[in-house]
């Protein structure tokens, strides 16, 4: 089992780095085309006025950066992977958009306290629940701001393909934490939390909303 989990972690490391050019294709296949809908499910929970500064942690290949800029937000993306950064920069530039990207750890953000009206992260790895990350997100959020996370999307078509993909999610550790007490975990870091579900055509997106009190 230890060997299996080392292989899983190695596979994800490749996907986020040297194999990042396959990320959009892989995410489309394993979600049956629902991935972008799962990402967009977070946007309605930003609770920030248009033009506000939004921080996206682990921006990946930049699809949500495009969506948020199209809505009129001033978006900054922060990601550890230089490969994701290069893909996102090219993608935004092709769209005629301004890439505002930084690179580094979420546990040590290079931004001033209270710099952002909201923070968003879709399908992050376990770094997102690290105490250092939650402290940093709380610090850079303005009072009354939301930290919005999409940890999972669940296919609900009920067919053999959906069942097979759900099995794949389970064996790669992406269905853990079903009994996780969000409120008890986030409260010591200053957040009030809730989990909501947003409907997509063939699935449900799970959205965590962690609110920093005004």
Image (tube, rainbow, N blue to C red):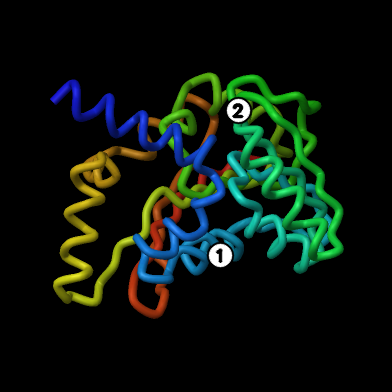
In the figure, residue 110 lies in which quadrant? top right
Distance from label 2 to label 1 (Cα)?
21 Å
Quadrant location of the N terminus?
A: top left
**Mark 2, other Cα within 10 Å: few <14 / some 14–19 / many ≥20:** many
Which residue is identified by label 2? 106
Judge by depth and name the residue closer to the eye, 39 or 211. Answer: 39
Quadrant location of the C terminus?
A: top right
Q: Is residue 89 left or right of residue 173?
A: right
In the figure, residue 92 lies in which quadrant? bottom right
Task: Find numbered disc 1 in the image and state the secondary structure of the residue it sits on.
Answer: helix
Q: Is residue 128 left or right of residue 168?
A: right
**Mark 1, other Cα within 10 Å: few <14 / some 14–19 / many ≥20:** some
Q: Position of residue 212 (x, y in %)?
A: 60, 39
Q: Is 92 rendered above or below residue 200?
A: above
Q: Residue at left 14%, top 72%?
A: 160
Q: Residue at left 25%, top 39%?
A: 173
In the figure, residue 45 lies in which quadrant? bottom right
Which residue is identified by label 1? 40
Q: Position of residue 172 (x, y in %)?
A: 25, 41
**What number is the disc on residue 147?**
none
Task: Find numbered disc 2 in the image and state the secondary structure of the residue it sits on.
Answer: loop
Q: Is 22 rendered above or below residue 84?
A: below
Q: Position of residue 95 (x, y in %)?
A: 80, 65
Q: Position of residue 58 (x, y in %)?
A: 58, 40
Q: Residue at left 59%, top 22%?
A: 107
Q: Which badge, 2 or 1, is on the more N-terminal residue?
A: 1
Number of callouts in the render?
Answer: 2
């Amino acid at each position: 089992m230890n060997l299996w989990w080392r292989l899983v972690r190695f596979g994800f490391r490749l996907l986020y780095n040297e194999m990042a050019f396959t990320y959009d294709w892989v995410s489309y296949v394993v979600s049956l085309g629902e991935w972008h809908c799962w990402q967009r499910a977070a946007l309605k929970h930003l609770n920030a006025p248009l033009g506000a500064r939004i921080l996206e942690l682990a921006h990946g290949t930049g699809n949500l950066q495009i969506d948020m800029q199209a809505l009129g937000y001033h978006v900054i993306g922060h990601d550890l992977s230089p490969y994701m950064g290069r893909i996102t920069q090219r993608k935004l530039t092709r769209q005629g958009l301004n890439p505002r990207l930084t690179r580094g750890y979420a546990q040590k953000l290079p931004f001033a306290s209270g710099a952002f009206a909201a923070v968003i992260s879709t399908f992050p790895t376990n770094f997102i629940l690290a105490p250092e990350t939650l402290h940093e997100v709380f610090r850079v959020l303005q009072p009354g701001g939301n930290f919005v996370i999409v940890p999972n999307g669940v296919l609900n078509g009920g067919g053999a393909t959906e069942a097979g993909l759900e099995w794949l999610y389970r064996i790669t550790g992406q269905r853990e934490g079903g009994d996780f007490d969000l409120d008890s975990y986030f409260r010591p870091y200053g957040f009030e939390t809730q989990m909501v579900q947003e409907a997509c055509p063939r699935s449900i997106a799970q959205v965590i909303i962690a609110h920093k009190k005004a």
